[in-house]
Amino acid sequence: MSTFIGVGYIVYALITVPMMVAQAATVASWYPPVGVALVFGPGLMLLGARVVDEPVRWITGWALACPVCVVLGAALWGALRVGTSPDPAIWMLDFAGLAAVAAALVSSIPKTLPVIVLVKSAAAYVAVAHQDPRDVPEMAREALFGILFTSLFVCAAVMVVRTGTDLDRSRSAAAAVVEAHLRNAELARFDGLIHDHVISTLVAAGSNPGDPRVADLAASALSRLDALAGDPAPEDEQVTDRELVARVRAVIDPGIDTVVTAVDDSSGLLFPAVVVRALAEAAGEAVRNSATHAGPGAERAVLITVGAERVAVAVVDDGIGFDPDAVAVDRLGLALSVRRRMNVLAGGRADVQSAPGAGTVVEVSWSRP
């Protein structure tokens, strides 16, 4: 919006500066260049909001300076005038309202309406001082019309800014929810590992320490703990197609009844470890969401398709489904976390298809760039 106001200042400058030059004989000789810089400068500075480090402070300062400089410019014009003109037109009447619209970027409607009256009254004062003969009633009507006309644009500007602010807040809140959900997902993975492997191994060892399977369970639990505590995989690490399938299977909670099928047509190619990890975590998240939201009695399946150029993991259930365009807050894990994990990858993609009563299909995939 600040850019739009800045462009408006450029347009009005091109229109009104020639008129100001033509009327320069009625004021001191040094006023025209000073007046141009004073009146148009703050509005043009709004264009710099895109390149500064603190755009909010930049916009606030220059937006509030716009009406102040118009009033100051009008006061100087009246104080420095050395003559009059029969021309009823005055350059300041044509654009003074734009300064009030600029102020609306950082102020409410009740606070901006007095600004409209102030800048239009200042412009009308210049017009009255400029004219000979003076027609005060006509200038008053002109100022009143300008106030009413500009008020429409001020209200529109305030609503646009308010809508943008609400949208920014909603996005920030959604991002915070996603971050919290990702943390909870990692905690869920850790809790699942402790419950399904560590505790089960300890229970087995306590009930039947001589069982040879206890050693295998302990080795498996230790291996999983080491993997969880180890450093993340380097970006250049590659894994085989079999390892890819194994990692996807490993993240699926064994306590969730799920049919897993793998189709491998990759001819033994290698895949980036970061991609495999993202696919596995996103698939595990989709399975957990299905178990939580698909409803009792829903059946689910996971299809892992490994190709030479594309890998896809589809999580399908025949549960109650939902409307993807009206995702509830508690479904952010499916709608945002899964997509976020995949969208950060070059070639990554996440698709969610569902409808009320028609089940859900979540497919996460990666294509070689």
Image (cartoon, helix red, strand yellow):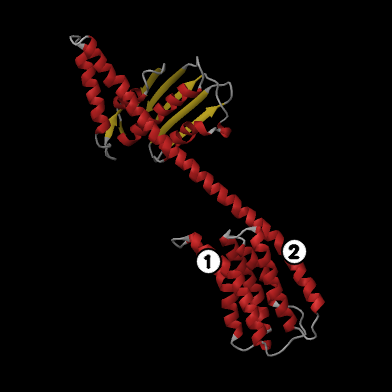
Q: Nearer the viewer, residue 297 or 7?
A: 297
Q: Which of 33 and 262 is in front in this view?
A: 33
Tell me which corner region of the image, top left, top right, bottom left or bottom right, holds residue 128: bottom right
Percent x, y of residue 168: 53, 48
Left or right: 49, with 268 as reference point: right
Q: Is residue 94 visible?
A: yes
Q: Can residue 245 be seen in this view?
A: no
Tell me which corner region of the image, top left, top right, bottom left or bottom right, holds residue 328: top right
Percent x, y of residue 244: 32, 27
- Determine whether 163 is above or below 29 in the image: above
Measured Cα–Cα span from mark 1 to mark 2 = 26 Å
Label 1 element class: helix
Q: How crowded is mark 2: few (under 14 residues within 10 Å), some or many (20 or more)?
A: few
Q: Nearer the viewer, residue 54 or 282?
A: 54
The circle on residue 61 is: 1
Percent x, y of residue 94: 70, 72
The circle on residue 302 is: none
Percent x, y of residue 114: 68, 66
Q: Residues within 10 Å of mark 1 (few under 14, many from 20)?
A: some
Left or right: 325, with 203 as reference point: right
Label 2 element class: helix
Residue that numbered label 2 is attached to: 148
Which residue is pictured at 49% across the width and 34% down the height?
332
User: Mark 1 or 2 closer to N-term?
Assistant: 1
Inspect the image, locate mark 1, and give the three-letter code of the amino acid beneath it. Answer: Gly
Inspect the image, locate mark 2, and give the three-letter code of the amino acid beneath it. Answer: Leu
Instruction: Evaluate if marks 1 and 2 touch, with contact meaning CB atoms under 8 Å apart.
Output: no
- Determine whether 195 is above or below 368 in the image: above
